[in-house]
Amino acid sequence: MNSSKSSFNLGRVFEILNARQEPKIIESYSVTQTTLEQIFVQLAGEDEDLSSDQDQNNEQ
């Protein structure tokens, strides 16, 4: 689950995941803290997307 552009109640997320473990829809899950490297890579990718969009607009 990517939370970069969404807002959610973390407690509710755990409730849903735990409910799915009962009928074995989800076998296991983990939650980790985002690293600075992940943030940098994501921001760099978003910047690249914006640059690409601007280049396409300039060509038109």
Image (cartoon, helix red, strand yellow):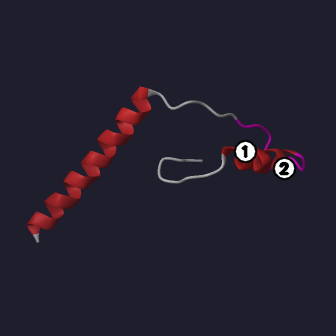
Occupied quadrant, residue 39 = top left
Amino acid bearing label 2: Ala
Image spot of residue 49 (x, y percent): 28, 52
Compared to 17, does 40 lie above or below? above
N-term mark: 2 or 1: 1
How far is disc 2 from disc 1 in space, using C-alphas? 12 Å
Q: How many marks?
A: 2
Q: What segment is highlighted magenta in the picture?
A: 22-29
How busy is the neighbourhood of tag 2: few (under 14 within 10 Å), some, or many (20 plus)? few
Image spot of residue 10 (x, y percent): 67, 44
Q: Residue at x 77, y 51 (%)?
A: 16
Image spot of residue 9 (x, y percent): 66, 49
Occupied quadrant, residue 52 = bottom left
Q: Residue at x 11, y 72 (%)?
A: 60
Please name the residue that numbered disc 2 is placed on.
Answer: 19
Image spot of residue 25 (x, y percent): 81, 50
Q: Residue at x 15, y 66 (%)?
A: 57
Is residue 49 left or right of 3 when viewed as pictured?
left
Please name the residue that numbered disc 1 is placed on.
Answer: 11
